[in-house]
Image (cartoon, rainbow, N blue to C red):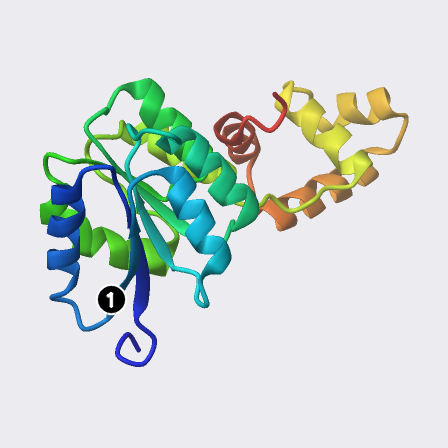
Amino acid sequence: MYNTHPIVVVIVDDCELIRFSLKTILARLPYAEVKFEASNGQELLESLKLTDRLPDVVLLDIGMPIMNGYETLHKLKKEWPQINAIVLSQNCAEYSIRYMLQHGASAFLSKKNALCSILNVIKEVTELGYSYSDVVPKDMFEKIIRKREPIPELSSQQKKVFQLIYEGLCNKEIAAKLNVGTSSVESYRKEIGRKLDLKIRAEFMLFAVRTEYFT
């Protein structure tokens, strides 16, 4: 598959040595192709407007002149949401990790070990849409990734029933609250469960907490 359709990569970093190192590593792969390089975000965005083939993956630094990685990622995902962004940075503070993942980054790597793992991360990102690394707190990573997943739409009445289930009311109490029969509540509950793949009441509660559905 990769031989006929290579993974097209763009490298964005103000350090020429980093760009050279990444390009050298990627040159070993028969299924990857470095389309171009950029030394800052503005240069990247201008080049994307002119290219004849959008990249599959952008390797993105944070600390760059003219336009840093934060602003670059925001504009990149707004204009070209289909492009996967892998962040490579020396700045692995929690704020930076959280910001970049919440704004659409598919992976966050420390430059200290990025060169060792970048090949596997690129493959995972193109196949799955994201890749976990140990510089990111696992619970934070999983929570952010879950929130990106589209949640099936519930009707307004189903949402009301789900909210009351979440608040701990039983079917009889929900029926009285909504002025409907208990059989209707049970029907709504089953339909919610079918849409969200939930069965028992505890699963409803856990789903609401994990996805922050009512916050």
In the image, 180 versus 206, the foreground residue is 206
Where is residue 51, by image quadrant? bottom left
Reading the image, the residue beneath label 1 is 32
In the image, 183 versus 94, the foreground residue is 94
Q: Position of residue 127 (x, y in %)?
A: 34, 60
Q: Is residue 149 visible?
A: yes
Q: Please name the residue shown 33% across and 38% down the image.
A: 40
Q: Position of residue 197 (x, y in %)?
A: 56, 48
Where is residue 196, by image quadrant? top right
Question: Tag 1: residue type?
Answer: Ala
In the image, 105 versus 44, the foreground residue is 44
Relative placement, left or right, of 114 versus 98 is: left
In the image, 188 versus 209, the foreground residue is 209
Q: Outermost residue, right direction?
A: 179
Q: Secondary structure beneath disc 1?
A: strand
Q: Is residue 143 visible?
A: no
Relative placement, left or right, of 13 versus 21 is: right
Q: Please name the residue shown 90% across and 26% down the image.
A: 179
Q: Position of residue 81 (x, y in %)?
A: 51, 49
Q: Please name the residue shown 38% across and 59% down the image.
A: 56
Q: Please name the residue shown 45% across and 46% down the image.
A: 45
Quadrant that contains the C terminus: top right
Against 41, residue 58 (above or below) is: below
Q: Local crowd at mark 1 within 10 Å, few (<14), some, or many (≥20)?
A: many
Q: Position of residue 130 (x, y in %)?
A: 35, 48
Relative placement, left or right, of 185 versus 106 is: right
Figure label count: 1
Against 85, residue 103 (above or below) is: above
